[in-house]
Every structure is written in C-alpha cells, then in structure tokens.
C-alpha cells in the first residue's frame, strides 16, 4: 500500500509539473509577438543569448527578467525564432513577388496521415515546450527556404538572409541518423536552417517540414563558393572576434566533424560556452561526415544545458527528434504497415531482437543467448503470471474444459539481422519456452528483398520501434 501511495504521489506531482509547464508555454507562445518590441536596455545577456544574432538580441527584454534559467533560455529561443521568421516575412513582403524557389505542397505523408506514430506504443511523450519549439522551427524553415534562393547566392556571391547548417555523411544508415539528428538539434538551438546533401533521401523519408525542402539545391556548392575552415582553425585565427582582420575569416564556411578520431579542440564546439557566439554571423556551417551521436555533448555546455534540460528532461534527444523528423516515405510505410498488421498486431506483446555481427559472420552463441534473454526479460510479471495460472486452473476445473479452451498470451518475437541463419535457429528454439513462460511464441522476420540496403535497414529500424 505504501508503494502505491508513493506512486500516486509521484503521479500527482508529475501532473502538477506538466500543468505548470503547459501554462507557462501557453503564455510565452501567445505573447511573444506582442511583447518583444523593446531593446534589452543594458540587461545582461547569458552566454546562450550572446550566441543569438544581433538582429534578435533587441527582442529579448521580457525574457531577461525570468529567474529560472531553463525557462529564460526557452523564452529567448522562441523569441529568436519568431524574430528571424518575422524578418524574412518582412523582406518577402517588400519584394512583392513569388518567392517560392522549391516545390511547395501540403503534407501528403501517408505515415503521418494514417496514424503511423500510434504504432510506437512505448514512445515517450514529448514535452509541450519542445512541441512549440519544433512547430516554430518548422515555420522558420519554410519561410527561409521560400525566400532564400541559394542558387542566386552562389551566382551573386552574396550572403543569404538566413543562416544554414549543411549536413552530409557517407557512413551507414545508423551512423547517419545519429549524426543527422544531432545536427538538427544544433540547427534548432542556433536558429539555422538545416539542409542535407543525401542522394536517395526522398525514397526513405517524408519531408519533415511540410511545405519546405530539406535537400540542398542542385548545383549549390559550398566548396567552390567559400573558404573552408575547421572549427579549431577558426578559433585559432580568432575568427568571430570583432577585432580580427584575418582575410580567411571572411566568407568562410566552418566545417564541423565528429568521429572516433576527433581531437579535443574539435569538442570545444560542443562544450565551450562561447562557441555558438563565435560563429553566429557565419552564414554556413557544414557538418561533414560525422558518425557520432554528438548531441549529448551539448549537455556539457553550461550555456546550453538549461535549455536542453527544459526541452529534453530525460536527455532522450534521439528518441524525441526521431519521432518528429524520421517519418517513413510512402513506399517504406506500405512495407512497414503490411508487416505490422500481419505479424505484430495480432500479438498481445511484441519483442524486438536486433543481432549485429562483425563482418556479417554467423555466431551460434547469439542463438543460445537470445532465448535466455527472452526468458529473463520478456516473461510475465508475477501479477500477470498469477492471474494466468488462476485462469488456467478455472478452465481445467470446468466440466467443458479442453486444452483448446486455454488461451495464453501470444508473443511475437521480431528478429532483425542481416544474417539469415539466426532466424532459422531461433524459430525452432524460442517456442520451446512456452511451457515455462505460459505464453505462446511466434518468431517473425522480414524476407530479404531486392530493395536498397538503406531502405531495408530503415524498415527494420521502424519495426523495432513498434516492439
């Protein structure tokens, strides 16, 4: 009883906290545009606020009096996105012409329209403040890609109105997604437009920002247009300082790379409180060929941590941004939906098993371990087990009882592996657990297809999220 009371108390506190966050968020969202009209009047800016562009710093005054660090940073971020978007909309109105440079269309993603996210039953709930930030960022992204014609920027050698983060990566899909979502996080907190250079992206994913375009425009080349400097070299040359006259700092693109071989100086981009301020007026950052989930490094940055703690209280950056950003394309969604309805939906419980082997070599040891893991981790909890035993006892004592009257929970075990031998072995061994676990088991896996490796990998990734 004490345990239940404790759980209820925790639940009550969580509900109260959520109510407070919701009220604060509602106030900020509905009053930002109306109250951000005065300069800062000498009020001191935090390191995060100093990293915002000069054009938005004058709009932060109402945020500067907020005492809670996270709320103040969140308020400043929302104000910055609002100011950046308003500036672009104002320029577009002055131009009085059709500013759309990309194919703009309403959201037509079947995955989102058909309730695909609901298949992820154990997905964590997104914080209301994060929802508002992502909504503002999507609007900002759309207006910038409508207004800025990067092909014209390339031809005229002029800087664009908005600032950009370009992302490219040649590693496997898993490394790509970790790197990409980390880059997206930086793009959001620094108010930069994320564009990617990734052939075949549209065959895997829907556009994350309806009405916008994620791919780098064809024919646009940062290499030919700008001088490339690593962030470490950029800081060595004192670029970003008002007093520097180093010619290499002018019209430069700062290249950011995070791999297993990155040096300590490279990590200063993540953890240094003044890093964002140093590059705030640089039009293009290029996150090139990173293969790490470097988003967590930003939590070590004193300037960014309060904001990140507000947006991601559980520090689950990849999980939350994947919900928002990684929607399967229509072609991939058809495969996922069909497999789910046929193999996972009928089960009362789904268990996902991913097996990764070095160089694709089959290892019998894995097949021996998986059933033990399922026995220890996927068994009925004591209360469920007791209830199941009681049901079976009643059925057995019934005059009309028969073996077929006993209905045991069905568990679907989804095997994700590039080595087919595991599925064949586990299909035989896992059902042998049924007498011990009082559950029925069915082992399923995707049939090896002729689709691209990335398409198959993402399909498996999405199905694992359904377990």
Image (spheres, helix red, strand yellow):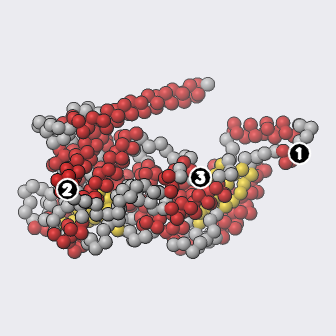
Please give left or right for residue 156 compared with residue 186 in the image: left
Quadrant of residue 224 within the rendered picture = bottom left
Nearest to N terminus: mark 2 or mark 1: 2
Please give left or right for residue 134 compared with residue 364 in the image: left
Secondary structure under the numbered disc 3 in the rendered image? loop
Q: Position of residue 110 (x, y in %)?
A: 50, 57
Q: Residue at x 19, y 46 (%)?
A: 56
Q: Residue furthest front?
A: 97
Marks 3 and 1, Cα distance to the nearest angstrom? 32 Å
Q: Position of residue 178 (x, y in %)?
A: 42, 59
Nearest to N terminus: mark 2 or mark 3: 2
Quadrant of residue 305 within the rendered picture = top left
Q: Nearer the viewer, residue 237 or 195?
A: 195
Please give left or right for residue 441 compared with residue 256 in the image: right
Q: Nearer the viewer, residue 288 or 302?
A: 288
Please give left or right for residue 48 compared with residue 401 in the image: left
Q: Residue at x 31, y 32 (%)?
A: 27
Nearest to N terminus: mark 3 or mark 1: 1
Q: Residue at x 26, y 56 (%)?
A: 144
């Amino acid at each position: 009883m004490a345990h239940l009371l404790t759980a209820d108390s925790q639940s009550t506190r969580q509900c109260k906290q959520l109510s407070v966050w919701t009220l604060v968020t509602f106030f900020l969202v509905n009053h930002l545009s109306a109250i951000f009209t005065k300069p800062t009047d000498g009020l001191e800016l935090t390191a995060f606020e100093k990293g915002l562009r000069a054009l938005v710093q004058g709009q932060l005054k109402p945020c500067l009096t907020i005492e809670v660090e996270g709320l103040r940073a969140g308020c400043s971020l929302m104000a910055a996105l609002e100011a950046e978007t308003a500036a672009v909309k104002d320029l577009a109105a002055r131009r009085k012409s059709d500013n759309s440079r990309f194919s703009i269309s309403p959201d037509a993603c079947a995955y989102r329209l058909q309730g695909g996210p609901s298949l992820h039953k154990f997905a964590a709930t997104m914080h209301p403040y994060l929802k508002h930030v992502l909504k503002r960022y999507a609007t900002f992204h759309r207006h910038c890609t409508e207004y800025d014609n990067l092909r014209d920027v390339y031809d005229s050698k002029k800087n664009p109105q908005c600032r950009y983060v370009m992302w490219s990566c040649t590693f496997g899909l898993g490394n790509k997604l970790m790197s990409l979502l980390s880059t997206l996080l930086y793009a959001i907190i620094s108010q930069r437009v994320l564009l990617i250079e990734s052939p075949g992206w549209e065959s895997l994913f829907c556009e994350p920002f309806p009405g916008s375009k994620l791919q780098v425009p064809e024919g646009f080349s940062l290499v030919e247009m700008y001088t490339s400097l690593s962030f470490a070299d950029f800081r060595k040359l004192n670029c970003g300082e008002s007093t520097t006259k180093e010619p290499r700092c002018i019209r430069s693109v700062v290249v950011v790379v995070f791999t297993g071989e990155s040096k300590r100086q490279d990590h200063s981009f993540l953890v240094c409180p003044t890093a964002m301020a140093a590059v705030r007026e640089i039009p293009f950052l290029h996150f090139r060929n990173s293969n790490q989930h470097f988003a967590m490094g930003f939590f070590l940055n004193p300037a960014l941590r309060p904001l990140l703690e507000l947006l991601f209280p559980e520090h689950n950056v990849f999980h939350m941004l994947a919900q928002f950003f990684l929607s399967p394309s229509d072609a991939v969604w058809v495969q996922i939906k069909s497999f789910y309805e046929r193999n996972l939906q009928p089960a009362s419980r789904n268990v996902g098993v991913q097996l990764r082997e070095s160089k694709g070599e089959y290892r019998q040891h894995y097949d021996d371990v998986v059933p033990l893991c399922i026995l220890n981790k996927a068994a009925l909890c004591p209360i469920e087990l007791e209830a199941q035993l009681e049901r079976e006892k009643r059925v057995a004592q019934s005059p009309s009882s028969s073996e077929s009257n006993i209905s045991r929970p069905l568990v679907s075990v989804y095997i994700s592996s590039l080595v087919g031998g595991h599925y064949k072995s586990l299909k035989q061994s896992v059902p042998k657990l049924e007498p011990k676990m009082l559950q029925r088991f069915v082992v399923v896996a995707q049939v090896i297809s002729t689709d691209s490796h990335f398409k198959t990998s993402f399909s498996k990734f999405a199905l694992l999220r359904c377990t």
